[in-house]
Image (cartoon, coloured by chain):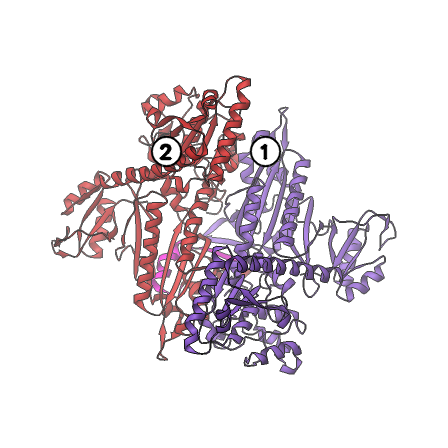
Chain colours: A red, B purple
Amino acid sequence: MGALRLPSLSSIFASSSTAISSRSPSLFRRHCQLRLPIRRISAANFSAQSTAEKELAPGIEDPDVNQKSRVQDKDRVITPRSQDFNAWYLDVIAKAELADYGPVRGTMVIRPYGYAIWEAIQEYLNVKFKETGHSNMYFPQFIPYSFIEKEASHVEGFSPELALVTIGGGKELEEKLVVRPTSETIVNHMFTQWIHSYRDLPLMINQWANVTRWEMRTKPFIRTLEFLWQEGHTAHATLVEAEKEALQMIDLYTKFAYEQAAIPVIAGRKSRVETFAGASKTYTIEAMMGDRKALQAGTSHNLGQNFSRAFETQFTDENGQREHVWQTSWAISTRFVGGIIMTHGDDAGLMLPPRLAPVQVIIIPIWKKDDEKTGVLNAALSVKEVLQTAGIKVKIDDFEQRTPGWKFNFWEMKGVPLRLEIGPRDVSSGSVVASRRDVPGKQGKVFGISMEPSVLVPYVKDKLDEIQSSLLGLATSFRDSNIVDVSSYDELKEVISKGKWARGPWSASDKEELKVKEETGATIRCFPFDQPQGTKTCLMTGNLAEEVAIFAKSY
Amino acid sequence: MGALRLPSLSSIFASSSTAISSRSPSLFRRHCQLRLPIRRISAANFSAQSTAEKELAPGIEDPDVNQKSRVQDKDRVITPRSQDFNAWYLDVIAKAELADYGPVRGTMVIRPYGYAIWEAIQEYLNVKFKETGHSNMYFPQFIPYSFIEKEASHVEGFSPELALVTIGGGKELEEKLVVRPTSETIVNHMFTQWIHSYRDLPLMINQWANVTRWEMRTKPFIRTLEFLWQEGHTAHATLVEAEKEALQMIDLYTKFAYEQAAIPVIAGRKSRVETFAGASKTYTIEAMMGDRKALQAGTSHNLGQNFSRAFETQFTDENGQREHVWQTSWAISTRFVGGIIMTHGDDAGLMLPPRLAPVQVIIIPIWKKDDEKTGVLNAALSVKEVLQTAGIKVKIDDFEQRTPGWKFNFWEMKGVPLRLEIGPRDVSSGSVVASRRDVPGKQGKVFGISMEPSVLVPYVKDKLDEIQSSLLGLATSFRDSNIVDVSSYDELKEVISKGKWARGPWSASDKEELKVKEETGATIRCFPFDQPQGTKTCLMTGNLAEEVAIFAKSY
């Protein structure tokens, strides 16, 4: 199982290499207008399946959105989203140069453009974690195997997914080491040594780290053998405080998803069946992807005293009594990048929310004659400086070996929210043309925006805000039009079979929940915090139900 | 070898638990003045040797310099540096709460205060790397074993130190996976797929990651089984460019060491014997620790075409010829935190350079009567806000269960560069008292500094700058007074036996270099860039020498 190669994607997605005529007409038109060579559509150029295949599957490196590589024209076209969502997803990741497969089955190389999105996520969350009283630190990734066995449901949940180090420094180890799948056990081992009295509480920490889970079915960003995440861990004197913390963190994630990623997640509580291995309660944010599958985009767990009892993490309370601490843990991972791609992307490629976009504004200088060049480039440069000074992430594409049309297409595919075009006539009139990524064609284009900093800067900032809200608005409409209220199991089955989310009252057993999964492929994504008023009747049993649950197929 | 426990430090450092009378008198006096209980000095409270020992070896958690834990008085006293440098080092790490041992032998938990120093290092370097054209990305940590074997000297250098994953998802793997000790091999595997023509070059990336080396003799921060670092990797079209890059990065590290860490490193080239496994040339920055041992604090390698030939990383040049790329790699790790501790620390504990200090200014409000309390605390709070607004990292210690004297001592031990004291009389006169960490006692104390923001802010900023330069100045004098020019092997031996660094002309063989190591314990740290003028005669052979080398014992 070691360094197995991924099967060639071209064989899996053979259907995507169909004739051009099957593409969405609008995409086809766009490419024709831009005189881009039409080539075979395929997910196969997601490079690095194996060294042997490299001639067939070249990747195109674009470090820091470096433009040099773009002389290679081939395979810029991506599978239409409507035609094959999965092939589209892989195409976008390959062609926008977000990630590539690593040499070991199921591992992923996060390329500079993809990593920059993760850095933007980190930047926001890191500040918020500190504002809410958490400190960063770092725990070793090697965990003695015996630790994992200490918490019964934890070992049950994680043992099938473990990677084990058995040899170190050329010698067989006496105790196998687990490469951390999550850190609750080692965190508790250390907390037990640091926590003595109530004065040591709350203890609130976070770490940014890599984790390993030996997943069988992998998908870039969504599920990989190794991924990056932050994991928060806290210990409290009371259950009430731990519960408050777990809720605070899921709220923070919710706010992040809405305000930064423009993803209208639904926050709620997991069912018992779906609760984290070792937690008392799991809170989640669930996002609807473009194919209407649900993505669990972040979780926060109230761990109760499960780990503190297993590891004897105790404190002396104000009355001198020894008590076990109450704990939480919470995480968001590089999976979120996959969520952004699958929420906002369209047939033209990636579409990034301005607040997380590595490049918010791309400037395309346009000239035909040599005597126009200097004026246009100077104007582009001065516009860039003005925007940069105002804190906007801006880039000029002045690469001469590409046509403006090619560049428009390229940066749309990269998901850059706003494009500014500057030609000789714009230079004369001291203005620029702006095009929105989220509004295709002429509708998204505005002419004659003054280059004057006092006009241009607020214009660009407003436009970026507008795009940010517009993406959230679109995603929210899409989500709402795909959640259907159901009051019976038959209705639920019908809704799920149409690929939508079903919301209905639920008070049935775990067994019945598993039956739904088996029969429909859908699981309870959550009992949303936002609950309808009034009495409810369980869609399965007809008994009284306290809450509605949301059912959906998921990643 | 797996989860072996570290031997109890108290047994190793039994000598440090000697009677109080053997301590440096000044430290003793200081503690008496502050009415601190004098306790047994020992490195044994570096916690977490094992779960079983936890009652004997409690750690004291201090997340984000949280003050609650400080009600525990015990073991605040550290071994004097002059008495036992190693015990002092471990005491400082334990008592300033920088790190703790992990449960697996040789692993380290980096605690919030220690991690904050690493974050300050990251913040500076990350910006500089981007400014010099590098992009962050992320490579998987699991490397097929066969990759490591491809570059002959690389496998020779690293194979004794590898941790191997042999089981994944419950099954024996077909190919063992190496947990990355460094990423040259996997980087080249990917570069081979991304690099096609000269237009794809230079390719310049960096990653922040954890790495694993199965070291036998470990020491917190300095040498641990797993550590954190950044590793830069670049590919170029020519040797000249690669050499320029390797030098640029060692220069960047040198500037960082001098300007941020106040460590006057000596930059130079490694001897062939000491060159990185797989590199053509290794450049290094060597720092002199307080015990005059050398610490290799950062390296930059010109890899030549060693890895590109092993992995067939080729490009088509402007003439259509296929050529192997020329490469570099360079790294700084959490080891640097150890370097900061051992460069600046003194008998009172840690001493942090202001530019990397998690807390630059600690405010101690002082009151006796209850009616003084509000005024003092309000003044402290307003001073804090003023400084915070000016971008200074400031904290108030208003914990009521501790005396001001205890707090002075505590924050000195934590290495905070500047302390502001505010008492009732200071409130009346609208002034504060400032005390420098680097100038002990009354000499470092200035009274009557106005609280007026227009006075206080520039005063504090100037003072921090002054401390920063003063630390660099002190370390530079110490370094220079401990490097001795030698012209014969006998002189070299004498200098090394005194614990100093020897600098002398060297053109002898690798064999003779190894003889020096065997006979004196010293190695060539580097051929410094800064070379004396004039003809030189090799101290060993009497032959003409082009360069002087620096010999020293090292970590």
At label 1, counting other C-alpha atoms closer than 10 Å, the crowd grade (few under 14, some 14-19, many 20 or more) is many
Q: Position of residue B276 (x, y in %)?
A: 66, 49
Q: Name the residue carrying label 2.
A: A88
Camera-side residue: A354 or A179? A354
* Residue occupying the point 43% across, 67% down: B378
Say if residue A307 shows up in the picture: yes
The C terminus of chain A is located in which quarter? top left
Q: Residue at x 37, y 27 (%)?
A: A446
In which chain is the residue bearing label 1? B
Q: Is residue B131 above or below residue A60?
A: below
Most extreme residue toward the front is B429
Front one among B505 and B225: B505
Quadrant housing residue A148: bottom left
Looking at the picture, which amino acid does disc 1 mark? Leu
- The residue wearing badge 1 is B201
Q: Is residue B339 visible?
A: no
Instruction: Describe the element under mark 1 as helix, strand or loop.
Output: loop
The Cα atoms of the two marked residues, 2 and 1, are separated by 29 Å
How far across and down, in percent of the image, does residue B275 sit?
A: 69, 49
Indicate the secondary structure of the residue bearing disc 2.
helix
Magenta residues, start to end: A149-170
Q: Is residue B197 above or below residue A515?
A: above
Q: Where residue A452 sits in the image (x, y, percent)?
A: 45, 31
